[in-house]
Amino acid sequence: MVYDSIDVQRGERDVVRFFPTVPFGCEYSQTSPGTDCYLTLFISDNTTHDTCESNTIQHQCTVQLKGLTKEDNNAAMSWAINSTFEVITAESKLGSYNLANRHFTLRLSTGITYHTFWQDYESETVTVNVYERETSQMWQGRECQVHCDPHHLTFDGMRFELQYPGKFLLFKSTDPPMQVQVEIQSCYNSGAPYCACGLVAIAGQDIYQIYTCFGKNIIKFEACNDNVLKAEMISSRVYKIYLPTGATINVFIRGGRSYNMMDIDIIPTHHEYQEQVTGLCGNFDGDKCNDCVNRGGRFPCTTPAPNGCRGGYSYHPNEFTSSFRLTEEESLLGVIPDVSLLEPYPTSNQVCVCPEGSTSLDGTEIVGSFSSTTHCTYTQYASCENNQDREMKCRQHLLLSNTRGKRSVQQNTYTHEHEREERSVVMTESEATAACSLALMTSPSYTTCVNLDISSSEIETCTADLMLTGDSTWTRFAVDRFQTACLEIIAKNSTLQEQFPDEVNAIINNTCPNSCSEQGSCAGGVCSCDEGFASDDCSFNLTSPLDVSGLENDDLCDLRYECDLILVNGPDFPYGRNYTCQFTGQMTFVNSSVRLLEVQNVTAQYQSLFGLLCDLPDVGTLPGRLGIQYSISVAMDPYDFSTAMTFVVIDSLCQTFTYTAGNISFNIKDEYCFINGVCIPAGTDNKDDLCQECDSQDSVYTWSQSKDCTVSDLLESTGGVTNHVTVIVAVTCSVVMVFILVSLGVYYWKLHTNSSSKERGDSVAAVYTARSDVVGKLHFEQRHNLNKPHQLPPLEGKKRRVFHTDNKTLPFPLKDDI
């Protein structure tokens, strides 16, 4: 090692330098004498700590040392040069400000190689000392907020109002490519005040959306091509999204069935500070006075933010906010996005944690560079903690079936531009302040948090909201926001945890989601709901029927994209209950016959506040089946099933379906056949019979006879004719022709021979007829006078022959010749 230690500023990169003390030679080959070779060196972290809390990250856990060939200039010591590998320091644990280890040690090792000289060598260690950035206090504890109706706070601390509807760019980074978009609509679906009701987080080609505008209920991944976004359900109404840099987005769904509202907190890391970020969250350079910079980089605010650039809830910089309004082409809110238009996350950002012993060796051959303890990821935070129960899964095949030409979930024309609406006051300031102060001060954690010097501006925020709405529900939201902020600060500040353990435990135990909606009691951080109420925040009234608002993918389960799950949407599925999905339905066959399916009940998986996942019954593949029509309903615990929703199971490649008078009919697209349950394009040959093809004009459900099936067609359809096949075909044809010619020759020869034989046969037949008469007469005479010799009449030109009658088997054989 060139140095035995290096100093690295937290969040920065540096290199470890090393050089070989003896040359590593390549095996000489006469056929390729200049071939390069490399020695693999394994990087390992010798510090004793949990891999998931390591603050050591490398791009890879190996480095290659180039070997020396015969052609290299040995005299110049070309092999004794410095090599490097890069290290990155990161947070010891996701969401924590303090490092668990202020230093770590690294070493290089060769493991087992092909030459014993280089086996099991270990280098000296190098110590990496991590120190805090001088500007670390500039980003720690900062947040970008969108609260209530909505009150905005930039990273640097400027407060302002945005009171008109639209879709806006909240935060954007170009390196790495990340952005957060927000939609603002009427809180009560009828004019002012306005609240945030939709958010979409984008990193590379990953998209996660939470959307409640216009009665829509969406909480899910819209795309996960890069797998750099992570999302967790903290409670049924609280969701946390992790950006790959370690920044987090907390989303609190405050709305109900009659109004829309969500609170949004973006908590940055050192990666976002002074890294050319832009949006309504400001440029995050530590100076709140220059936050009012529009998208073009100009300073449009003619009136600077009051109160020393801190702004306030009476500050409306409309020129600034309107510059970050998104066009329909830019917005990914409430739409099914075209992921191909997004920039992929850079592969160069992949990093790994390399604990000691993470290399896997077998004998003399390296069989793997990493073991299961090695953690490689594209995220910049060194944490592999994973709450499997609460992590939101990206189900790729459900996303694929969404891309059937539909872009928008809800298209809207905004009648309000950036003019601020005047809002009437329904409660005086003193009345609102008194109500908010009472709600906060009587909360279980308020006094303890204040005693730990954790302050908040929630009384001011709550007062402004209560003056405009008069709705006491907003005071409960203020209490929940304050308690959540207090818990966030405690979780990130290990000093508070160490110095005030009793106070910290009291806050944790007395803080429950949404203050149990004032319909239950909090104990140990868990709500115990009053009778008749349910969910983790006791917000669900069990006397209300379970409502199902729709099914994913336009009521279609598409076999083209692995149809095994159906997502049931609803406005409010309470957490912690048991859900059952009930399936009924029928199958339609190509001959128009229908077969009813048995009723099946399956256990549902809780997906989110707005979704349940139901496993589709396995109906297998049946010959002649055209499609399946299902009805699905959902029940919670022992309660009745909800209203049934209908969906179909088809292959969208070649099938469509239509509703007619309440009945579903299945159709096959033009230029397709549907044979044995498979979509087949017109003109496709039957692989089992090359003289059959799909002719949709002739028959949609069966193979048709090809109109011009020839030998050459058969040969071509088998995948190409080789020269050998051509020779065999030519020889076979020649043999057949020779056989035909020979057969014709034999036929004509026999025909000629038979003609001559017939003429001779007629003459012989006449002679034998005369002879038979004589022989018959002779036999008669023999029977009457056996001792008397008999003579045949003389034959003209022939010697006379005499018959003897000694033979008892007359007339044949005779003793003498005839």
Image (cartoon, rainbow, N blue to C red):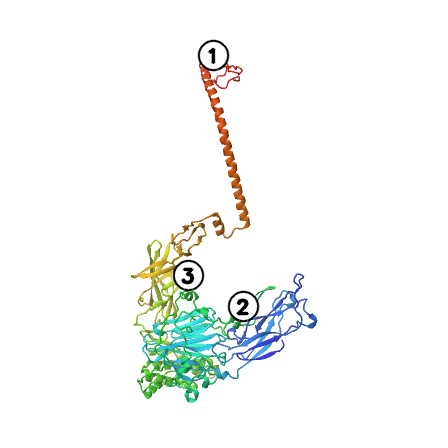
Looking at the rendered image, the disc whose residue lies closer to the viewer, 3 or 1, is 3
Which picture quadrant has residue 200? bottom left
The residue under label 2 is: 371
In the depicted structure, whether residue 710 falls above or below residue 187: above
Is there a contact, CB below 8 Å, between mark 2 and mark 3?
no
Distance Cα–Cα, label 2 vs label 3: 36 Å
The residue under label 3 is: 560
Q: Position of residue 207 (x, y in %)?
A: 44, 71
Looking at the rendered image, the disc whose residue lies closer to the viewer, 2 or 1, is 1
Looking at the rendered image, the disc whose residue lies closer to the viewer, 2 or 3, is 3
Q: Counting other residues with Cα less than 10 Å from the Cα at mark 3, is it few (<14), some (14-19), or many (20 or more)?
A: some
Distance Cα–Cα, label 2 vs label 1: 122 Å
Which picture quadrant has residue 320? bottom left
The residue under label 1 is: 786
Q: What residue type is labelled 2?
A: Ser
Which structural element holds mark 2? loop
Q: Counting other residues with Cα less than 10 Å from the Cα at mark 1, is it few (<14), some (14-19), or many (20 or more)?
A: few
Pick the front one: 584 or 160:
160
Q: Position of residue 700 (x, y in %)?
A: 38, 54
Pick the front one: 78 or 99:
78
Q: Position of residue 433 (x, y in %)?
A: 34, 87
Q: Which of marks 3 and 1 is nearer the N terminus?
A: 3
Q: Which amino acid does label 3 sit on?
A: Arg
Q: Position of residue 486 (x, y in %)?
A: 42, 82
Q: Can residue 248 be seen in this view?
A: yes
